[in-house]
Image (cartoon, helix red, strand yellow):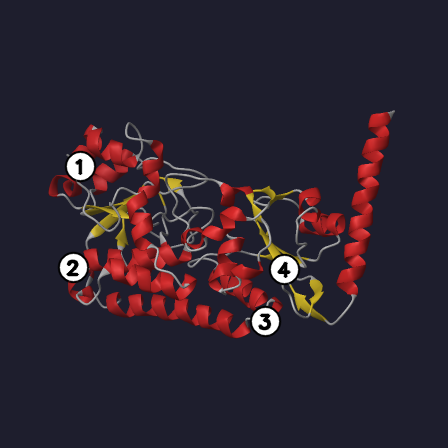
Amino acid sequence: MDRSIAIMGAGLGLCVLVFIFTVAAQAGATQKITDAAGKIVVLPDKVDHIICSGSGCLRLVTYLGAQNLVVGVDDIERRNNRFDARPYALANPQFKTLPVFGGFRGRDIPEKILGLPVLPQVIFKIHGVAGDDPGKLSRKTGIPVVTLKYGDLVHSRQDFYNALTILGQALDRQARAQEVIHFFDAEIQALEDRTRNVPGAEKKTCFVGGIAFKGPHGFQSTEPRYPPFEFVNARNIARPADHGTAPGQSNFSREKILTLDPRVLFLDLSTLQMGSDQGGLYELQKDPVYQGLSAVKAGAVFGVLPYNWYAQNFGSILADSWFIGKILYPEQFTDIEPEQKADEIYTFLLSKPVFQRMNQSFDQKVFKRINLN
């Protein structure tokens, strides 16, 4: 009986909080925006307190320089790991001190959201892959939820740009949103301009292994339309012959890698999370099939920054692209110092250079020839 009364009391308290917050949110000037789901959402005209739900959502907010508005984080931001390839988190250590409102990948807890010391006026939420329903979350909390699509830089770049545009409108950072969009377009175009006229006969075949997907994987894990390869017109042996849209992460057989024998190999260093006795680096060192590859024999194996780490790291994709371009076409990239270029990218997006911290996390193997002995 007592337990039932306590549960009823807690439920009543939650309803009261939702009612109070909803009434408060309706007061004052408002703005209307259309989110990625096509829903019109009414927000305060001036937004000062937000939370970001779902893989990569907080990253986008930091690109707009709005991290000071964040009043809570999901639990991945509070973890301490030896490896971390999320530049936005490294540039904003204060996220580790903020209260937690739910689990990572959009697993929100309404009671925790309403219990935050500072209530958010808006919840921005990446939706479509995992996590709770935005409408249900808004009804439970009384807080407007703005749905975003994260997108990518190859198949769904417009979704990424739309997310920045929606955030820019909601947070009164329209100019910065357009500046970031122009930055990505300009970087990708510059890579294209340097490589589009390289004769096919001069292009070295290549392959990237160890691509992460919801955790680390071995060397067979790749990306048929790996963005850095796409941007520098590389001869990726895993790319479909018809050049059509390919799935994201997939496994490429060892036998195909051996048969096609790419001249240059790249290793996504997220695979180092698997330890010293497994993973992509270990396989390249010990597997007889990989030991027969021309690139392994020639020492043409290079480490690159992780591609997927709590969704795609857009800044790291650009940084990897410039490094890979320099390796595949040294004459077209003589003026590029990859580490310096990486920090130029991070400084623009995050206002801080974080390359050396990531390089240290990954055993100083980023943008280096990897010793397999």
Nearest the eye: 11 or 105: 11
**Is label 4 in contact with label 2 (beta carbons under 8 Å)?**
no
Dot 1 crowding, Cα within 10 Å, few <14, some 14–19, many 20+: some
Q: Read off the residue under disc 2.
A: 202
Dot placed on the residue nearer the N-terminal end, 2 or 1: 2
Please state which amino acid type lies under the numbered disc 3: Asp
Q: Which amino acid type is marked by label 4?
A: His
How many angstroms separate mark 3 from mark 4 (CA)?
Answer: 13 Å
Q: CA distance from mark 2 to mark 1?
A: 26 Å
Q: Are marks 3 and 4 in contact (CB under 8 Å)?
A: no
The residue labelled by disc 1 is 372
Residue at disc 1, secondary structure: loop
Q: Label 4: state its secondary structure.
A: loop
Q: Are marks 3 and 2 in contact (CB under 8 Å)?
A: no
Residue highlighted by disc 4? 49
Which badge, 1 or 4, comes first in the chain's sequence?
4
Kindly check if marks 1 and 3 are in contact, taking CB atoms under 8 A apart as contact. no
Q: Position of residue 188 (x, y in %)?
A: 35, 66
